[in-house]
Amino acid sequence: MKITISAIAAILLVGSITSFASAEELPSWIKNNAGWWADGTISESEFVQGIQFLIKDGIIVIPPTTVSAESSQGVPDWVKNNAGWWADGTISDGEFVNGIQHLIKTGVISVPSTEPQTMETPKKKDSDDSKLASLEADLEKCSEITKAYPRLNCEKAAKHEIEAYHMIKTGQSFEVGPLTYYWTGLGTEGNSFEISPTGQAILSVKLLAVHNGGSESVSMMCTGPSICNYDVWNGEKAYKYSGMDFTNGQIIVKPGTSEIFSMLFGPNIGYGGTTFEYDPSKEYYFRISEPYGSASIPLNIE
């Protein structure tokens, strides 16, 4: 199978142009992606969206380009031909980038106004963190794996490490025995509170559990709503989950690893569950009550 998610392929196609523009030879998988777009495997809209996102995010940089009165409703055939020729080595990197500039000039790709940038002096990313750069490089390397399942497993593991890194950097930490839990707060990815049109309060929480060291694996237990070491507490009542990530009632955190898990509190699903209720006069906490330790994480619901 050439690609599993064509949009990712479109991003990979252009995302490496800046990084390798001065190299003698571009990695073959990037040119393969260019060829797939040229032969129609990757759609025009995915190609355009991928480039536009990466230019706006400063991941790739195109030389200053003035948008003209000339407009285009799509990608011209010659730009698509260029992709195929670039893929087979007929034209240079610069000639391929000229095609991207044409798409900007004619309004097919829109980018925000920024200070002039050049291919030799790319825009610096907001984060210069070497650890994050290393993790992102690991994710990029996954694309070199030709077999579908090993590639997907590689991408899954790399994306987990990147997400865990961000949660550690931006979240509050709560040490509970052999694990440290991190929570990034309501309003961040996977963490939300809302009242449904029917009046049901719905709370979603997403946490990271990091193994603190040692040689023993740690089990996080939740075998059902009535027997679960994780709940929400408002000082008077404990609320049991409506949905969660625990497989077979537990999550195993091995030494040197971390696990991300989510829990939903809302309608009563039975089996000892409860309906989540919100009272603005009360403070709500996500509680951890494991045999190896406990913690109450303030949710700050408003």
Image (spheres, rainbow, N blue to C red):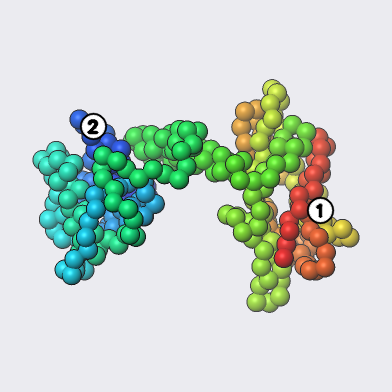
Q: Nearer the viewer, mark 2 or mark 1?
A: 2
Residue 127 appears in the figure: yes
Residue 154 appears in the figure: no
Answer with left or right where residue 216 lies relative to residue 133. Answer: right
Q: Earlier in the sequence, mark 2 or mark 1?
A: 2
Q: How many marks?
A: 2
Q: Which residue type carries mark 1?
A: Ser
Instruction: For label 1, count other residues whose C-alpha is less than 10 Å away and answer few (under 14), some (14-19) or many (20+).
Output: some
Closer to the camera in the image, 161 or 58: 58
Answer with left or right where residue 121 lies relative to residue 173. Answer: left
Determine whether 156 is above or below 107 in the image. above
Please provide percent x and percent y for residue 291: 83, 37
Q: Which residue type carries mark 2?
A: Ala
Residue at 49%, 36% (x, y): give it: 129
Please provide percent x and percent y for residue 170: 61, 45
Residue at 81%, 53% (x, y): give it: 226
Query: Which element is circle 2 on?
Result: loop
Q: Which residue is mark 2?
A: 23
Closer to the camera in the image, 120 or 300: 120
Residue furthest bottom as drawn: 198
On residue 256, the disc is none
Query: Which corner quadrant holds the N terminus?
Result: top left
Query: Which corner quadrant holds the C terminus?
Result: bottom right
Answer with left or right where residue 62 lies relative to residue 178. Answer: left
Please provide percent x and percent y for residue 47: 28, 55
Please provide percent x and percent y for residue 168: 61, 41
Q: Quadrant of residue 22?
A: top left
Q: Which residue is mark 1?
A: 226
